[in-house]
């Protein structure tokens, strides 16, 4: 089917604002940093002759849209982001779409339809992610001088811990509580291996099994935003990442204390 070409027309600022708020908040929730957000939406704005001013935060997006050809056709809107769920394939798909719109001069109707398809993309199943998490933590255990037994225990602990986190998330528990519980359960399993000397270096299993909880995307995006000058967003991400690390430490510390391990 032929693509819908953009025929120069007056697009209502409200319609354009609604579209970019939908795209922007979804990108933020999927793990985009502010620079990516600005470049992707900027391509759409330049194609349809709009000036935009965006103020992204960790929880939402504020935009001001002004028609270059009609200053009266302008609006300022805010939208809260959905719950954060990193999905990097979404970022790639939106980037490809924005480039295509700019290069082929496509219409806003095309973008609305295409983005609806992108939003409907399913992420990997929880079971697949849990298996991948288990293998990655087991590999890190081997790199940390653990043996095969330690790696096996790490795999089991990370797998179960991730599934526990997903379970409580689906019960609408606070995300930080979910992380603390997952850290506690993961450390409980590897801590049992430490008590019964399962493997040659059980400490390696305890140290690496919880690494799947580390907020890599928020911390990386924090540095990128800081470098690019989005200071408020960078601070928000840093605080969010730091609090996750605190929750991981709290869950581990409580478990280690209850198990009576005093030389970890």
Image (cartoon, rainbow, N blue to C red):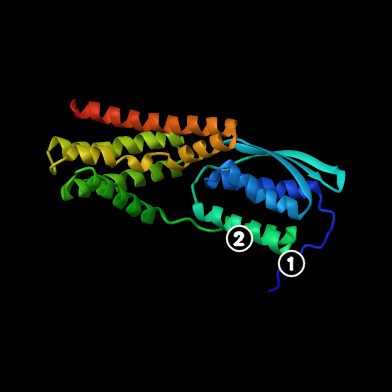
| 161 left or right of 82 in image | left
- Image coordinates of residue 81 in percent, x first then y, are 60, 41
- Which residue is the extreme one toward the bottom? 1
Does 12 sit above or below residue 58?
A: below
Q: Residue at x 37, y 40 (%)?
A: 213
Q: Which mark is residue 117?
A: 2
- Which residue is the extreme one toward the front? 227
| 164 left or right of 262 in image | right
| 253 left or right of 170 in image | left
Q: Residue at x 22, y 40 (%)?
A: 204
- Image coordinates of residue 236 in percent, x first then y, are 54, 31
- Image coordinates of residue 52 in percent, x first then y, are 74, 43
Q: Secondary structure at mark 2?
A: helix
Report the Cα–Cα distance between label 1 and label 2. Answer: 16 Å
Q: Residue at x 51, y 36 (%)?
A: 222
Q: Earlier in the sequence, mark 1 or mark 2?
A: 1
Which quadrant of the figure contains the C terminus?
A: top left
**Circle 1 Cα neighbour tier, 10 Å, few/some/many (<14 / 14–19 / ≥20):** some
Which quadrant of the figure contains the N terminus?
A: bottom right
Q: Which mark is residue 4?
A: 1
């Amino acid at each position: 089917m032929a693509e819908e070409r953009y025929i120069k027309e007056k697009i209502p600022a409200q319609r354009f604002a609604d579209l970019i708020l939908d795209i922007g908040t979804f990108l933020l929730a999927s793990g985009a940093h502010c620079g990516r957000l600005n470049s992707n939406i900027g391509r759409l704005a330049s194609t349809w002759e709009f000036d935009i001013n965006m103020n992204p935060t960790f929880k939402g997006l504020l935009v001001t849209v002004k028609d270059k050809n009609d200053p009266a056709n302008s609006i300022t809107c805010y939208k809260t982001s959905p719950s954060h769920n990193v999905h990097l394939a979404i970022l790639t798909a939106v980037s490809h779409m924005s480039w295509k719109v700019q290069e082929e001069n496509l219409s806003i109707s095309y973008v609305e339809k295409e983005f609806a398809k992108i939003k409907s993309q399913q992420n990997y199943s929880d079971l697949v992610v849990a298996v991948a998490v288990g293998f990655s933590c087991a590999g890190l255990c081997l790199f940390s001088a653990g043996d095969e037994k330690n790696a096996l225990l790490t795999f089991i602990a990370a797998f179960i811990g991730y599934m526990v986190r997903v379970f409580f998330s689906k019960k609408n528990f606070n995300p930080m509580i979910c992380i603390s519980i997952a850290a506690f359960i993961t450390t409980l399993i590897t801590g049992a291996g430490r008590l019964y000397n399962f493997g040659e270096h059980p400490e390696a299993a305890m140290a690496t099994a919880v690494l799947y909880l580390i907020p890599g995307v928020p911390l990386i995006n924090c540095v990128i935003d800081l470098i690019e000058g989005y200071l408020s967003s960078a601070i928000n991400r840093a605080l969010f990442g730091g609090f996750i690390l605190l929750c991981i430490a709290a869950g581990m510390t409580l478990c280690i204390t209850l198990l009576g391990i005093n030389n970890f």
